[in-house]
């Protein structure tokens, strides 16, 4: 998956990945070094136009 490579490029790791039925089709839990890296990843993936990434920080 290309977005997993993008996640690695900002220093993040994929923790889990789930398929769902409903408003959200896929749920991915990932860890990023900081909020700026997570935002950069979201912008990079959203810029493709093929998916819509929404971030929810878990603290």
Image: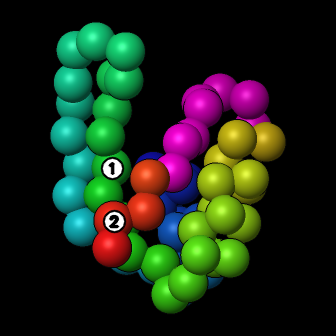
Asked if residue 20 is among those painted magenta in the image, a careful observer would answer no
Residue 59, percent from left and from top: 33, 73
**Few, some or many residues within 10 Å of mark 2 (<14, 14–19, 20+):** few
Considering the whole magenta stretch, tell me its main secondary structure: loop
Give above or below for 53 relative to 59.
above
Residue 34 position by quadrant: bottom right
Q: Is residue 4 visible?
A: yes
> Which disc number belongs to residue 28?
1
Nearest to viewer (mark 1 / mark 2) = 2
**Few, some or many residues within 10 Å of mark 1 (<14, 14–19, 20+):** few
Q: Is residue 14 visible?
A: no
Label 2's element? loop
Residue furthest toward the front? 59
Which colour style is shown?
rainbow
> In the image, 20: left or right of 10?
left
Q: Which residues are magenta?
A: 48-55
In the picture of the structure, the residue carrying the numbered disc 2 is 58
Residue 57 position by quadrant: bottom left
Q: Identify which residue is drawn at 74% across, 29% down.
A: 49
Q: Identify which residue is drawn at 59% across, 75% down.
A: 35
Q: Identify which residue is drawn at 31% across, 40% down.
A: 27
Asked if residue 52 is among those painted magenta in the image, a careful observer would answer yes
Q: Identify which residue is drawn at 34% across, 23% down.
A: 25
Sequence order check: which comes first, mark 1 or mark 2?
Answer: 1
Spatial separation of the CA atoms under disc 1 and disc 2: 12 Å
Along the viewing direction, whichever of 43 and 59 lies nearer the viewer: 59
Along the viewing direction, whichever of 3 and 22 lies nearer the viewer: 22
> In the image, 21: left or right of 23?
left
Label 1's element? strand
Residue 24, percent from left and from top: 36, 23
């Amino acid at each position: 998956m290309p977005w997993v490579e993008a996640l690695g490029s900002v220093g993040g790791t994929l923790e889990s990945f789930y398929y769902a039925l409903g408003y959200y089709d896929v749920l991915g839990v990932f860890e990023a070094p900081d909020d700026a890296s997570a935002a950069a990843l979201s912008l990079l993936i959203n810029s493709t136009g093929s998916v819509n990434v929404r971030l929810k920080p878990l603290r």
